[in-house]
Image: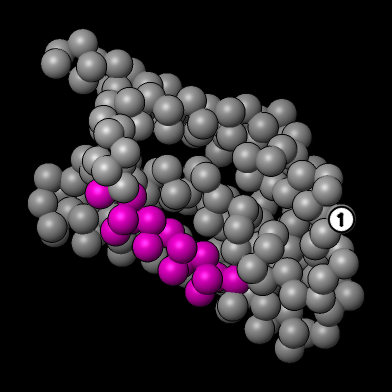
Amino acid sequence: MLEKIVFSFVTFLVILDPVGVAVIFAGLAHDMPADVRRHTAWRATIIASVLVLAFAVVGEPLMRALGISVPAFRIAGGILLFLLATDMVFARPSGIRNPTGPEQAEAAQTRDISVFPLAFPLLAGPGALTSVVLLIGRAPDMATTAGIIASLLAVLGLTLGALLLADRVAKLLGLTGANVVGRVLGVLLAALATQYVVDGVTELIQR
């Protein structure tokens, strides 16, 4: 059980990438007063937590209702995470995790960035939503499920801390440093995504 919980913690840490999100947040909120930045960080983290936890509860029943098998979802999720890992390794933004150009323009016109683009897609993006369903789907018992959710909340807590210290993180690492961290995490995520695809294909063959 402990191994699965540690694995879940590392997975969420890689996908949420608190350091990378903090650097992006520092750029988005550079002209905000300090109290507004703090409020935005808290609100975004709470909203993202609700989204991911809701998906953790309804994700598998929704799959069953749509006739989607767990192996098929693992394969699709693995491919999606691999695309995300590719973007992280090559440090290029895409609609998988970062807002697209039109979405960034929309975000620039609104004063509240806590829901979009911070909570979604930066925090509770497709990668996080996919991973929580896959990890909980592989949990053998309720204790492990609770541990996976606890690891998710722990990573969200670390992300909140990084957002609250976004200015310091951005100054310490800079864009290049953040990209280096993202590339290292991207390599790990690519391996994890490949494993999801392998597991899904293996389950389909064994059926």
Q: Is residue 130 left or right of residue 41?
A: left
Residue type at mark 1: give it.
Answer: Ala
Q: Quadrant of residue 64?
A: top left
Q: Is residue 109 above or below residue 100?
A: below
Q: Is residue 143 above or below residue 132?
A: below
Q: Quadrant of the C terminus?
A: top left
- Report the predominant secondary structure element of the magenta stretch: helix
Question: SS class of the residue under badge 1?
Answer: helix
Residue, x 19% and y 46% (percent of image)?
139
Q: Is residue 162 above or below residue 101?
A: below
Residue, x 27% and y 43% (percent of image)?
65
The percent position of residue 68, horizontal first and vertical second, equals 30, 33
Residue 58 colored in magenta in the image: yes
Q: Is residue 140 visible?
A: yes
The percent position of residue 16, horizontal first and vertical second, equals 53, 52
What span is colored magenta in the figure?
Answer: 44-61
The percent position of residue 194, horizontal first and vertical second, equals 42, 22
Residue, x 67% and y 32% (percent of image)?
87
Q: Quadrant of residue 108?
A: bottom right
Q: Quadrant of residue 191?
A: top left
Which residue in the structure is indicated by mark 1? 105
The percent position of residue 78, horizontal first and vertical second, equals 43, 28
Residue 28 colored in magenta in the image: no
Residue, x 62% and y 53% (percent of image)?
121
The number of numbered badges drawn on the structure is 1
Q: Is residue 69 left or right of residue 74?
A: left
The extreme left residue here reads 141
Callout 1 crowding tier (Cα within 10 Å): few <14, some 14–19, many ≥20: few
Q: Is residue 195 visible?
A: no
Residue in front for this viewpoint, 113 or 188: 113
Q: Is residue 31 left or right of residue 54?
A: right
